[in-house]
Image (spheres, coloured by chain):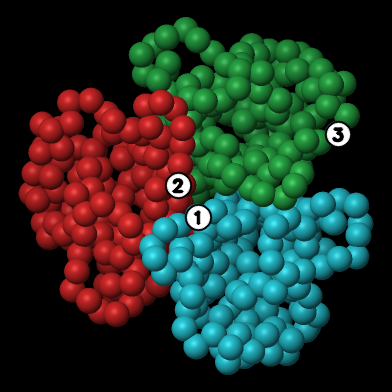
Chain colours: A green, B cyan, C red
Amino acid sequence: MKPGFEEREIFTALMAEYAMAIDDNRLEDWVELFDEACDYRVVTRENAEQNLPNVLIWCDNKNMLRDRVESYREVNLYNLHYDRHVLGPLRFLTKEGSTRTFEASYSLFQTELEGASRLFSVGKYRVEALVANGAARLKSVTVIADTGLIPSLLATPI
Amino acid sequence: MKPGFEEREIFTALMAEYAMAIDDNRLEDWVELFDEACDYRVVTRENAEQNLPNVLIWCDNKNMLRDRVESYREVNLYNLHYDRHVLGPLRFLTKEGSTRTFEASYSLFQTELEGASRLFSVGKYRVEALVANGAARLKSVTVIADTGLIPSLLATPI
Amino acid sequence: MKPGFEEREIFTALMAEYAMAIDDNRLEDWVELFDEACDYRVVTRENAEQNLPNVLIWCDNKNMLRDRVESYREVNLYNLHYDRHVLGPLRFLTKEGSTRTFEASYSLFQTELEGASRLFSVGKYRVEALVANGAARLKSVTVIADTGLIPSLLATPI
């Protein structure tokens, strides 16, 4: 039996949860998708292609993600916009040991409280994930944003 | 064998058909995806989160869906715009008996006859569905639209 | 065992590679997804529905695709924009012999070098594909663009 569809199910479910946790403003649930030893960063595609060191966000362990969400909760008592991610299908790359690398394109829309929706960012995720104790976990998520005009003080993760 | 990927296939196929039936202007096919005892409603996220009773559309059985499509056909002799749904991956929630609950984010674009496409609405579906006699059927679809500026006399379903 | 999820995996992976190859500017890889005897065309939905013969792009074998990409490389020394496809789930249609026909909706965004992203086109793919020697291959891809305002001298494929 080809294992392809089983992996697609597991990691598609993981990314569906990733996106919906942010969009539902369940950022604490989003953090819990990561392994303790993890890496989350947002870079622009231009910087990624030119190997420039600039990053818009960089958290290199889970406690930094926790801190980030906690700060966000303190500053933003009210949700100022709604996020909405629509992700494309996963493209699987390498598998080293139990770590699976894959990519997925995203479109991210924001809706202001006045009710109008607009395109906020498009790009792709490059993800390293594994399955441990029956649960899929994120080891590393790099958001490579095509859109270069993203405010560096991003309120919510992408 | 984990049943996850089989359910993902069945209900992903159902939602692909749901979206394409609307986009192809095969609204009668869209109605046929629902069970006789069904519920279809469109609400805004703001109302959903505040538990307000406002709904933009509400059909609480299949005959109401049939009537709605029939009225639409009588009024709109020509298609005035094209719809295009792009759905994200399904996020599975509970399973009670044979009823599966899941969510999926959507982006909905409209194209005017002049040829320009624009973002019309983003949001998510919350769906209850089941498999009966080998076919997947929709028991309940709630469209929770992030976009609040949707005309209440929606021509085509979301 | 229902073969549905295995086919969904194979052809979803194929379309994920299709989209990512274009978006990564790996157009040579994109060509390699096609069979030698293949057909690629871009039409508008209006023309498709009225059975008009107009096509925006038409390559009726793989060498034409190779030529097209080669010309593109000669003319465009630098990438003038980034493409980003976000595809919806596949809707399977007929299966004749080993050839599978399916459709998928797409949203295509472009990002200028200044960094702003915008919606470029939405529509759907109608695809004929098969699995030969363990690899999925494209026999025919028809891009049916809802958006009518696409420049006829398209730089990159859709």
Q: Are marks 2 and 1 in contact (CB under 8 Å)?
A: yes
Say which amino acid is labelled 2. Answer: Leu
Subunit of label 1: B
Instruction: Name the side, left or right, on which B109 lies relative to B116.
Output: right
Q: Residue at x 67, y 79 (%)?
A: B34
**Quadrant of the image for the C terminus of chain B?**
bottom right
Q: Nearer the viewer, residue A33 or C81?
A: C81
Say which amino acid is labelled 3. Answer: Tyr
Subunit of label 3: A
* Residue B13 can be seen in this image: no
Q: Are marks 2 and 1 on the same chain?
A: no
**Residue B70 appears at what percent x and percent y?**
62, 90
Q: Which residue is mark 2?
A: C119
Q: Residue at x 87, y 21 (%)?
A: A74
User: Dot 1: few (<14), some (14–19), or many (≥20) neighbours within 10 Å?
Assistant: some
Subunit of label 2: C
- Which disc, if any, is residue B135? none
Q: Are marks 1 and 3 on the same chain?
A: no
Q: Nearer the viewer, residue B20 or A122?
A: A122
Instruction: Name the side, left or right, on which C128 lies relative to B100.
Output: left
- Which disc, if any, is residue B118? 1
* Residue B44 can be seen in this image: yes
User: Dot 3: few (<14), some (14–19), or many (≥20) neighbours within 10 Å?
Assistant: few
CA gap, disc 2 to disc 3? Answer: 30 Å
User: Dot 2: few (<14), some (14–19), or many (≥20) neighbours within 10 Å?
Assistant: some
Instruction: Name the side, left or right, on which B39 lies relative to B13.
Output: right
Asked where in the image residue C142 lies, by quadrant, the reply is bottom left
Say which amino acid is labelled 1. Answer: Arg
**Residue A86 appears at what percent x and percent y?**
57, 46
Instruction: Name the side, left or right, on which B7 lies relative to A6.
Output: right
Q: Which residue is mark 3?
A: A78
